[in-house]
Image: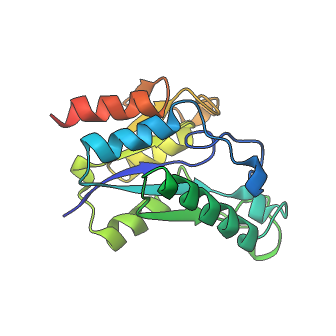
Amino acid sequence: MNKAIFIDRDGTINKDSGYTHKLEDLEFEDNAIEGLKLIKEKLPFYKIIIITNQAGIAKGHYDENAFHSFMDHLLEVLERKGIGIEDYYFCPHHEKGLGDYKKACDCRKPNPGMILKAIKDHDIDTSKSYMIGDKWADVKAGDNAELRSILVMTGDKGNDIENKVESAFIAKDLKDAIEYVVRDKN
């Protein structure tokens, strides 16, 4: 079985400008690149998988093609920095969305659907894997998938208090979160 670090995108890896989807809006959170490099350096056997809600698709702010173009750009920039991302999963749904995207689903965090699909697709050992995000919904999705979860104080900083999970480690940023994982796995 494989080990993975599941990471939220907006507010954790890149700054969340509000429905982030334009290539020119790509700006990394403080210490995000350093944190991702630390995974490659100290945890080379861990797969990095991005797990991201994309309500902007459901609400008509951008389409799936724009989302995938942004992701291709993000992955290319990270690759040039020596950081390979194994895979990414996204939820385009929202209860206040439009058309086919308007629905409650099992993939929108805090539900664990995206993570559970990734676990199956990549044969992940949940007891040795982590979920990191800037919202309590990210942490709760990780807990719901039986992962160890970490809240980072970048992006949203856990302002969605209705999803608060008591068991989470709280880190300053992605680098601090990965330093915790390095200590925790030993």
- Figure check: 155 above or below 91: above
- Figure check: 16 above or below 116: above
**Which of 36 and 51 lies nearest the eye of the viewer?**
36
Residue at image location 23% in from the left, 29% down from the top:
183
Q: Quarter of the image containing the C terminus? A: top left
Residue at image location 40% in from the left, 63% down from the top:
86
Residue at image location 57% in from the left, 49% down from the top:
9
The number of numbered badges drawn on the structure is 0
The percent coordinates of residue 158 (x first, y second) are 58, 30
The percent coordinates of residue 178 (x first, y second) are 36, 35
Q: Quarter of the image containing the N terminus? A: bottom left
Residue 166 seen anywhere in this rendered image of the structure: no
**Which of 115 and 66 lies nearest the eye of the viewer?**
66
Report which quarter residue 119 is drawn in. Answer: bottom left
- Figure check: 156 above or below 117: above
Residue at image location 35% in from the left, 73% down from the top:
121
Report which quarter residue 92 is drawn in. Answer: bottom right
The percent coordinates of residue 153 (x first, y second) are 55, 26
Report which quarter residue 185 is drawn in. Answer: top left
Name of the residue lying farthest toward the front? 80
Residue 35 seen anywhere in this rendered image of the structure: yes
